[in-house]
């Protein structure tokens, strides 16, 4: 009986630790930190730094669900609005330049609900 109670309590704790379905676990501070090294590339073009591509890889890793990707997309749009000199072509080509296939468009004009 005591073991069953412990098992039930353990299951309740585990359920509380998991994010609810449909809720994003990613935050804008995580997205900003992932893409901070990309600002020079996004504003001047050229070749993205290795640290930028590492950030893009991290962004992909922290956005496994649709809700996470939509939240990250909205964060990218907010961040892009803070940098009016971001080159749209550099932003849209960033994942490919890093050799990463992503489902998060990097653009200030993206509809994040799609």
Image (tube, rainbow, N blue to C red):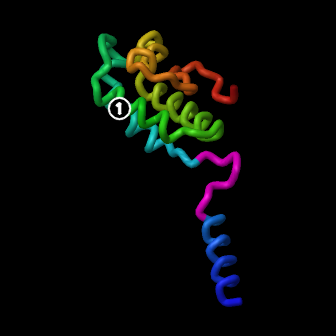
Residue 17 location in percent, x, y? 59, 63
Where residue 75 appears, x then y in whole percent? 52, 35
Image position of 111 (left or right of 52): right
Taking depth in this image into account, of 110 and 13 the one nearest to the observer is 13
Q: Is residue 21 magenta?
A: yes
Q: Dot 1: what SS?
A: helix
Residue at the image position 52 percent from the left and 20 percent from the top: 107
Q: Residue at x 41, y 24 (%)?
A: 83
Q: Which residue matches tag 1?
A: 54
Which region of the structure is painted magenta? 17-24
What number of labels is visible?
A: 1
Q: Quadrant of residue 30?
A: top left
Q: Taken as a whole, is the magenta stretch helix, strand or loop?
A: loop
Q: Is residue 92 visible?
A: yes
The image position of residue 60, as x and y in percent, is 49, 33
Which residue is found at the position 69% from the left and 77% from the top?
8
91 left or right, relative to 37: right
- Quadrant where the C terminus sits is top right
At a point 61% along the width and 58% down the height, the residue shown is 18
Say which quadrant the N terminus sits in: bottom right
Residue 87 located within the stretch drawn in magenta: no
């Amino acid at each position: 009986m005591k073991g069953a109670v412990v098992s039930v309590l353990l299951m309740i704790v585990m359920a509380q630790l998991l994010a609810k379905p449909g809720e994003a676990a990613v935050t804008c501070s995580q997205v900003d930190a992932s893409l901070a090294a990309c600002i020079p590339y996004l504003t001047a073009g050229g070749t993205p730094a290795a640290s930028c591509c590492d950030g893009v890889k991290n962004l992909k890793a922290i956005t496994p669900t649709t809700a996470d990707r939509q939240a990250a997309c909205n964060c990218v749009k907010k961040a892009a609005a803070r940098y009016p000199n971001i080159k749209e072509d550099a932003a849209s080509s960033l994942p490919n330049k890093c050799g990463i296939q992503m489902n998060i468009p990097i653009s200030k004009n993206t509809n994040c609900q799609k």
